[in-house]
Image (cartoon, grey):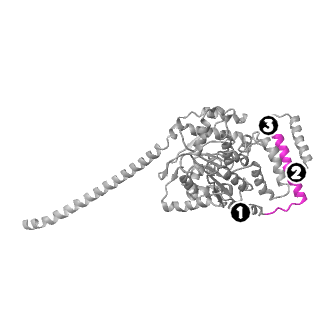
Amino acid sequence: MDMKVKKSYPFFMTIGLLSKGVKTMKRLLLCAVVLLMQVTSTMKLADFGKNKSKTPWRKNFNDLDKKPYNESVGYDLQMELWPDDRLALEHKIPSLLAHGWGSSPVGVVEYARLDGPHRIPGDAFTFNFPDASDSFNPSFIFDSSFGQEKDIKSLLVALKIVLDCGVIGCNLFGQSRGGGTVVNALAVLNSKTQQWSCKFDSIKNLFKGKIRLKILTMVKNGVVVIDTPMVTTQAGLNAHAHKIFRGMFFEKFLCNIVDKYVLPLVTRGNYDPYGPQALRSVESIPQKLKILLSYQRDDGSVGNVHDQQFAQKLSDRITGIPLFVILGRDAGKSICADTWDALRNAASDEIIKRWGQVIPSSCQILPAHNAGYITLLESGILNAFYQKNGGSFIQKSEEEQEPFKEILKKAVYNSVDMESWSKDNNDSIAVGIKKQMTLGNFLMVIGGWGTLFFAGSGMVMYLQGYSLPGIYSYLNQILSTLIAKK
């Protein structure tokens, strides 16, 4: 019996040792997993710390007293900094965004540029123009200037804030009215403060000494992106009217009335039909700027009539540096699912306010005017352009970068390609349902627009404190002028 136990003892001992070995291996494996997780976490923190060390403007912005800047423009700019902490991001310099008319920095498309997988690379500064709106209340137009002095002042002061945050280089991104304002503001910034109009008196003290030149250097150290710009207000009016009247003979006549008489009145003098327009201002912007210009085919908000002329002027002005022009045809395409989720979450959190807490699904499909988000950001073109010119960018492999290098080569401005694009665009705009206009319909349209103009103008003047005789005299003067022109 004892002999049997002695003989079997080595067998049981072997089993026991093997069992202990398995347990030890499990413990070692668990330790290895925990260690790997700790190393990964440490690396992530190191990357975050590395990016944080490259963004000193964040703390400077938070510490900056915004009150003097807001007082200089007469309202709260609501300047904000949107940090970009994506791990694949290589931080270089931030961007300053100028939003479109009838919207705000947190409109649907505007917010897509600030959040989600295809946001503008790097930290982004935003501010509100005086007429920024998050609702459907049309009264915002009282504070509109359509890219003129009031908007220019706001953009210039926003640039000053960015400079005071210790930023040595800054990208400018302007879309629609924001794009037109960027051009107008750069033209003002390129002239001495002594030459600035008296409308800029409240902000001149912020640009004394060499500050104006420092801001110019800061902009030149970055890039300027102009997406579907409003180069003239009248072109925008024509584009909107064209959607309704489809080229009827009185279309331009009505737009001329609105431009010359209605807009100056309803904007309380903020808009001047003879004031700054980007199509003229482009001739006075600083030279040697790195610019990406983006257009969309059949733009129903700002039109395409001046696309070639504006691009040619821009190319001529920035002598020695190629102008990059992206010609998009992305109207009717949908925002990608990941970005759409980010937008719906922002609405749920009441960051995007216009639609309440649920954005209608129709907003996922973009019209031509806003399709630059797909053309520039979802495609990766803007990321490649930033990387090429010293901006922040999402790191990609050489294989992934290769197609964008080819795209940017082809995007260098060429007047022949631009002429072909413009002709094709103008031909396509003319295509559409032609409204059959009888005499009765014609009189109805003229009567309706005329009644709306005179009644609306009278109401606006009354609300602004004009006396009834003064309103009558003003409207009678306009009517007499129109009759004399006919």
Hey, what amino acid is under mark 1?
Answer: Ser
Q: Which residues are magenta?
A: 433-462
Horizontal and vertical percent position of residue 442? 88, 56
Of 451 and 293, which appears nearest the observer? 293
Marks 3 and 1, the one that precedes in the sequence: 1
Magenta includes 45? Answer: no
Cα separation between marks 2 and 1: 40 Å
Label 2 neighbour load within 10 Å: few <14, some 14-19, many 20+: few
Q: Secondary structure at mark 3?
A: helix
Q: Does the CB distance between marks 2 and 1 fall below 8 Å?
A: no
Cα separation between marks 3 and 2: 24 Å
Of 16 and 2, which appears nearest the observer? 16
Horizontal and vertical percent position of residue 354? 65, 48
Label 1 neighbour load within 10 Å: few <14, some 14-19, many 20+: few
Q: Which mark is residue 447?
A: 2
Hey, what amino acid is under mark 2?
Answer: Gly
Of 296 and 211, which appears nearest the observer? 211
* Image quadrant occupied by the N terminus: bottom left
Q: Which mark is residue 463?
A: 3
Q: Is residue 277 left or right of residue 223?
A: right
Horizontal and vertical percent position of residue 50? 44, 46
Horizontal and vertical percent position of residue 120? 57, 51
Of 135 and 286, which appears nearest the observer? 286
Disc 1 designates what residue? 420
Residue 95 appears anywhere in the view: no
Residue 434 appears anywhere in the view: yes
Q: Does the CB distance between marks 3 and 1 fall below 8 Å?
A: no
Marks 3 and 2, the one that precedes in the sequence: 2
Hey, what amino acid is under mark 3?
Answer: Leu
